[in-house]
Amino acid sequence: MVVKPKIRGFICTTSHPEGCEENVKRQIKFIQSKPKFNCKKNILVIGCSTGYGLASRIACAFGGDASTIGVMFERPATKKRTATSGWYNTAAFEKMAIRHNLYAKTINEDAFSQETKNKVIDLIKSDLGKVDMVIYSLAAPKRTMPDSTKVSSVLKTIGKEYTNKTIDLSNNKLSEVTIPCASEQEIEDTIKVMGGDDWKDWIEALKKANAIEDDAITVAYSYVGPEITFPIYADGTIGMAKKHLLKTANEITNTMDGIKAYISINKALVTQSSAAIPIVPLYITILYKIMKAHNLHEGCIEQMYRLFGEKFGDSLNFDEQGRIRLDDYEMKIDIQQKVLDVWKSISDDNINELADIDGYWKDFYEMFGFNFSNIDYNKDVNIEINVPSIG
C-alpha cells in the first residue's frame, strides 16, 4: 500500500510504518550519542508508545541498558487500514531492542483495567521478578471504571469562560476561541481519567503482588505552562487532574513503604494530546521560534535524556511543590517575556515571521511517520507489521 497522510482536525488518521521506524531510530541514535547513565534496570512504562512515554522507554533502554515492559492501547493494521503510529513505534522499538540484546515486551490492552494489571504482573513475575521503576505516561480521553461505567475528560475552564487567540493550522489564520466552563461532573470525570487514581492503583497492585521492589521509584508526567494558558490548562479541568496527580504522588511516597513517587513537569511539545488543546498550538509555535533562536529547544527524547540521564543521575532538585522541573528552559523569565511580547503583536500578516509554523508541522507529521527526507512515500509498503512480543 502507498501510505499518505490524511489529516482530520488535529490528528492524522494514517501512519507510515517505515517513517515511524525512522522516528524511533533517530531517537535511539540521539541517546546512543550521549554518555551512558545509571538508571533502574527493570522498568514498567505505562503509556509507552508515543511522545514522552516512548522517549522514556528509549532513553532508559538504550541509555541505561534497562529491561522494559510497556503498556499501550494501540490498533494494529488491517489489509486496508494502517496501524496507529504507536503500534509501529513499538514494533520498531522492540526490533531495535532485540538487535541490541535488550529485554523488551509489550502488553496491548486498556491500562485502566484490572485484567491488564494482572497480565502485566504475571509477565513481570515470570520474566523480571520485580520492577524497580514505574513510568506513568498515560494520556487517554476516556476511562472505563471498575463498575463498567464510562467517563470522559474535557478541555474546559472552571468558573468562567475564557477567550483568547488561537490558530487554525490548516490555513495559518488567527482567530479567537472561547473555552466554555465545565460542570462539576465534568471536573470530577476529568480527574478520574487524567488524575492519579489509576497510577496509585497500579502501584498498589504491584505492591500487593510483590512485583515491585521496596525501594522502587515511580514518575508521572505533568505540565504547568505560562499564564496565557492557565485558564485552559493549569486552572482548568486538566489542571485539576494534574493537581490530583501531585496529591497522589505524595500519597504513594507516604504510604508505600519506601517507594518514592515523583512528578516531572515537562516542556510544551507537539504531541497528539497538546494538538487537541485550543490556544496551546499557537503558544507552541511562538515558543518554538524563540527557544530555537536561543538554542534551548528540546524534543521528547532530549527531555527524557535530561530527566533520566541527568536529573535522576544527580541529587534531585525540586520546586516549592516538590516537582521536578524539566520545563526550566521554557519557563526562563526572558523566554516567557519574549513569548508574551510576540503574543500581543502577532497577526495574520506577521505570523510566518514570528511563529515557527514549519517546525510545528514538522513535528506533527513526524509523529505519524511522515516527511522524513530519506523515506520514499510513493512506494508500496507493508502495513501489517507485527510487534515482536505480541506476534
Image (cartoon, helix red, strand yellow):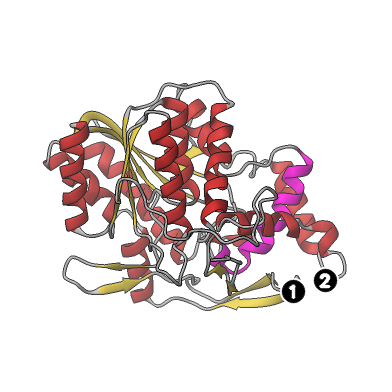
Residue 274 picture location, percent across and down: 55, 60
Tag 1's secondary structure? loop
Mark 2 closeness class: few <14, some 14–19, many ≥20 residues within 10 Å: few
In this picture, which residue range is highlighted in magenta? 275-294
The Cα atoms of the two marked residues, 2 and 1, are separated by: 10 Å
Query: Is 353 contained in the magenta span?
Result: no
Q: Is residue 145 left or right of residue 235?
A: left
Compared to residue 381, the image places residue 299 above or below, namely above
- The answer to which quarter of the image holds residue 102 is top left
At label 2, the amino acid type is: Asp
Mark 1 closeness class: few <14, some 14–19, many ≥20 residues within 10 Å: few
Instruction: Look at mark 2 in the image and give the residue it sits on.
Output: 348
At label 1, the amino acid type is: Asn
Compared to residue 94, the image places residue 353 above or below, namely below
Residue 284 picture location, percent across and down: 66, 56
Evaluate if marks 2 and 1 touch, with contact meaning CB atoms under 8 Å apart. no
